[in-house]
Amino acid sequence: MGATLLSRVLVLLWVTSAGAEVLVQPDFDAKKFAGLWYVVAMVSDCKVFRGSKDHLLMFTSNVTATAEGNLSVHMEVPGPDGCNQMDAEYLRTGSQGHFRVPSRTQEASPQAMKTFQDFYPTVGLPHDMMVALPKSDACSSGGQGAP
């Protein structure tokens, strides 16, 4: 269980730190960005991710803006033994708004999915390494203070 949880954390961290430049939303406000998000799709070239991507389910991230301009993220990931909880802090890099967390709802818009699918090949990831995550209510509470 510990190895599975660690590998998922590593996948999430790698996915969020891919090397391409991401455009920043003008007038980004971290407080408006804070709240419950659903991770609806992922892509990675990590061997652990590739071996488990067909068994992953949609999960939630509850985002809180910190006074330093970072984002504190509480994730609840469904696993075979229940809901696994993880915490991470996304450090502000450069300008405001350089963070990546996917969708406010369990339904990603076709436009958002197309943007995601157009983006990840620019960092060298082929289409067969992406997975759209099936819906899951296993961890739907959103954790710490989610609405």
Image: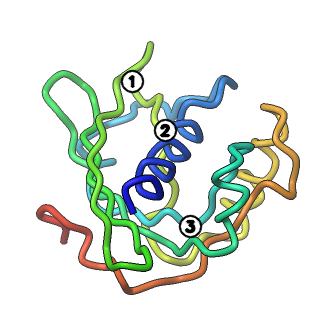
Disc 3: CA contacts within 10 A as few (<14), some (14-19) or many (>=20): many
User: Percent x, y for residue 16?
Assistant: 53, 38
User: Does the CB distance between marks 1 and 3 fall below 8 Å?
Assistant: no
Ranked by sequence position, the earlier of labels 2 and 1 is: 2
Rendered residue at 34%/25% (across/down) = 91
Residue at 69% over, 25% down: 20
Please state which amino acid type lies under the numbered disc 2: Leu
Q: CA distance from mark 1 to mark 3?
A: 24 Å
Dot 3 or dot 2, earlier in sequence = 2
Type of amino acid at the residue the image marks with label 3: Val
Real-space Cα separation, disc 3 to disc 2, in angstroms: 16 Å
Write the residue at 27% across / 29% down: 70
Name the foreground residue: 47 vs 71: 47
Q: Pick whichever, 98 or 39, lies toward us.
A: 39
Q: Nearer the viewer, mark 1 or mark 3?
A: 3
Asked where in the image residue 55 lies, by quadrant, the reply is: bottom right
Query: Which element is circle 1 on?
Result: loop
Q: Which residue is mark 2?
A: 13
Judged from the image, the secondary structure of the residue bearing numbered disc 3 is loop
Q: Residues within 10 Å of mark 2 (few under 14, many from 20)?
A: few
Residue that mark 3 sits on: 40
From the viewer's side, name the closer residue of 50 and 107: 50
Quadrant where the N terminus is found in the figure: bottom left
Q: Could you classify mark 1 by the number of other residues whose Cα lies within 10 Å: few (under 14), some (14-19), or many (20 or more)?
A: some
